Image (cartoon, rainbow, N blue to C red):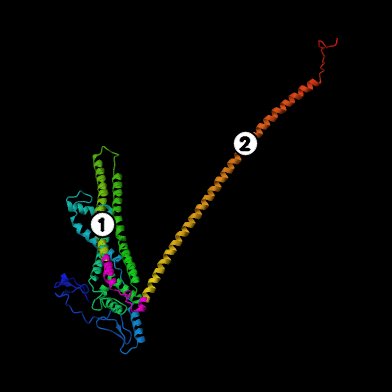
């Protein structure tokens, strides 16, 4: 296997991240010859009639094979790779962490057991006796808090080992320059075979897995954009894995203080329930009652104290380990963006001599532009449809409001007209009734006059021309 070393490490003795044996880094790092005689890729069997070259190059077809036969052997070699089984890079074994938690809890209580002095629930004699009583004599709550704490510590310890494994894989020379300075369609298979030749312990890491997937996609598609998109997606997946691996630890970090508060409630309940003031004249009973009350209050406060202290001690290493994993993931992203992607050559920078390559580039560019145009057009259509729907909704709402206002106004006019007609009819009725009464009175007067005789005497006037 090949390892990378910084110039300041020249001449130092280090441990190999693969076999853990000591090795000396040569003083002249720049003058080292490329290693030869690399083993054939682990778990990859050559198709019948072919073999792997000793320097980790790609699969070679038998001598004298034609172009079609070489292509057939190459396709068989691609299918023969098949990747390797990937273990979870960040989630530790649940049963392993549980076992560590149980063993650590038993060991802790075994360490504290000899420090107990005095009877059960008796006042502490010294600091170690107080710590012993804090874990032993404060109900079942403190036992549960301690177990959850050591279980979470077991998870963090296993995650730290996985992180160390991921950091060891960062020392591998994943893209050796002795194969080529750039990765193109002609030599990408050699780089992939080099990855398959790495030790199985180190190649199963986020770093190597991501590079392998990127190179295998480039081998098929030969498109830097698609490789970059796949690497970004894989980075998001790894980030989600790291974030999800802390779910159980966060549950413990929440449950430990809650258990402390539950212990407080139990202690207060015990203290209040043990109060006996029925016979205040008996001092012995009063003193025993006060002792039970103070014992319950001690349980109440000590359970909360232990829960808060354990939660604080658990929070610092959890956040430190989370930051270390994020930094390692950022280093992998930086390697992909700064080392892998600049060395990939998909033919996008061809000179004018390669017309077919230039046409492929133009076709891909036009296809990407058309894809972006269609995406923008679909987005614009969706917005226009949304505006049209909103306009229809507003028009419908306005029409409903106009109809409601018109109906209300019409009902109001109808009520006012009905009231006016009622008033007119009432006035006319009163007037007609009064007129009928007057006519009836006139008829009565005329009737009385008809039944009487009226004698009219003519009076003669005297004057110059009157008759005598």
Which stretch appears magenta?
329-358
Residue 14 visible in rendering: yes
Q: Give left or right: position of 387 versus 323.
A: right
Q: Is residue 405 above or below residue 50?
A: above
Gap in Å between the C-alphas at discs 1 and 2? Answer: 83 Å
| SS state under label 1 | helix
Q: Nearer the viewer, residue 211 or 43?
A: 211
Looking at the image, the residue that sits furthest to the bottom is 64
Q: Residue at x 35, y 84 (%)?
A: 71
Residue 426 on image: x %, y %: 65, 33
| SS state under label 2 | helix
Q: Residue at x 18, y 79 (%)?
A: 33
Q: Which mark is residue 420?
A: 2
Label 1 vs 2, first from the N-terminus: 1
Residue 355: which quarter of the image? bottom left
Mark 1 closeness class: few <14, some 14–19, many ≥20 residues within 10 Å: some
Q: Which mark is residue 229?
A: none
The residue carrying mark 1 is: 315
Residue 351 on image: x %, y %: 32, 76
Q: Nearer the viewer, residue 281 or 167?
A: 167
Residue 154 visible in rendering: no
Residue 423: which quarter of the image? top right
Residue 247 on image: x %, y %: 32, 60
């Amino acid at each position: 296997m090949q390892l990378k070393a910084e110039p300041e490490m020249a001449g130092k003795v280090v441990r190999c991240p693969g076999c853990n044996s000591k090795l000396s880094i040569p003083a002249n790092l720049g003058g080292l010859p490329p290693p030869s005689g690399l083993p054939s890729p682990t778990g990859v069997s050559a198709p019948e009639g072919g073999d792997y070259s000793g320097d980790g190059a790609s699969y070679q077809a038998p001598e004298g094979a034609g172009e079609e036969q070489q292509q057939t052997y190459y396709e068989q070699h691609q299918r023969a790779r098949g990747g390797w089984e990937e273990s979870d890079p960040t989630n530790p074994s649940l049963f392993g962490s549980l076992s560590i938690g149980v063993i650590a809890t038993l060991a802790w209580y075994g360490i504290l057991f000899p420090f107990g002095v005095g009877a059960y629930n008796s006042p502490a004699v010294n600091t170690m006796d107080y710590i012993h009583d804090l874990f032993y004599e404060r109900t079942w709550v403190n036992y549960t808090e301690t177990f959850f704490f050591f279980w979470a510590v077991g998870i963090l310890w296993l995650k730290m080992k996985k992180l160390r494994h991921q950091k060891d894989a960062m020392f591998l020379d994943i893209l050796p320059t002795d194969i080529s300075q750039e990765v193109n369609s002609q030599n990408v298979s050699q780089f992939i075979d080099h990855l398959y030749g790495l030790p199985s312990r180190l190649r199963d890491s986020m770093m190597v897995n991501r590079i392998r997937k990127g190179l295998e996609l480039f081998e098929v598609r030969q498109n830097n954009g698609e490789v970059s998109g796949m690497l970004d997606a894989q980075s998001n997946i790894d980030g989600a894995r790291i974030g999800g691996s802390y779910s159980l630890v966060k549950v413990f970090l929440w449950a430990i203080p809650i258990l402390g508060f539950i212990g407080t409630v139990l202690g207060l309940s015990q203290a209040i329930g043990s109060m006996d003031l029925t016979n205040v004249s008996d001092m012995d009973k009063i003193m025993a009652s006060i002792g039970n009350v103070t014992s319950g209050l001690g349980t109440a406060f000590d359970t909360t104290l232990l829960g808060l202290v354990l939660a604080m001690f658990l929070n610092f290493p959890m956040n430190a380990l989370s930051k270390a994993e994020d930094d390692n993931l950022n280093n992998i992203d930086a390697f992909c963006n700064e080392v892998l992607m600049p060395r990939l050559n998909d033919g996008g920078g061809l000179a004018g001599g390669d017309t077919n390559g230039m046409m492929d580039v133009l076709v891909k560019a036009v296809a990407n532009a058309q894809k972006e145009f269609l995406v923008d057009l679909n987005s614009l259509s969706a917005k226009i449809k949304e505006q049209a729907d909103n306009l229809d909704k507003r028009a419908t709402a306005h029409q409903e409001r106009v109809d409601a206002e018109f109906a209300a106004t019409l009902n109001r006019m109808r009520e006012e007209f009905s009231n006016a007609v009622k008033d007119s009819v009432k006035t006319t009725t009163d007037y007609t009734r009064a007129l009928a009464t007057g006519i009836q009175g006139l008829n009565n007067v005329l009737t009385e006059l008809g039944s009487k005789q009226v004698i009219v005497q003519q009076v003669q006037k005297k004057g110059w021309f009157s008759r005598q």
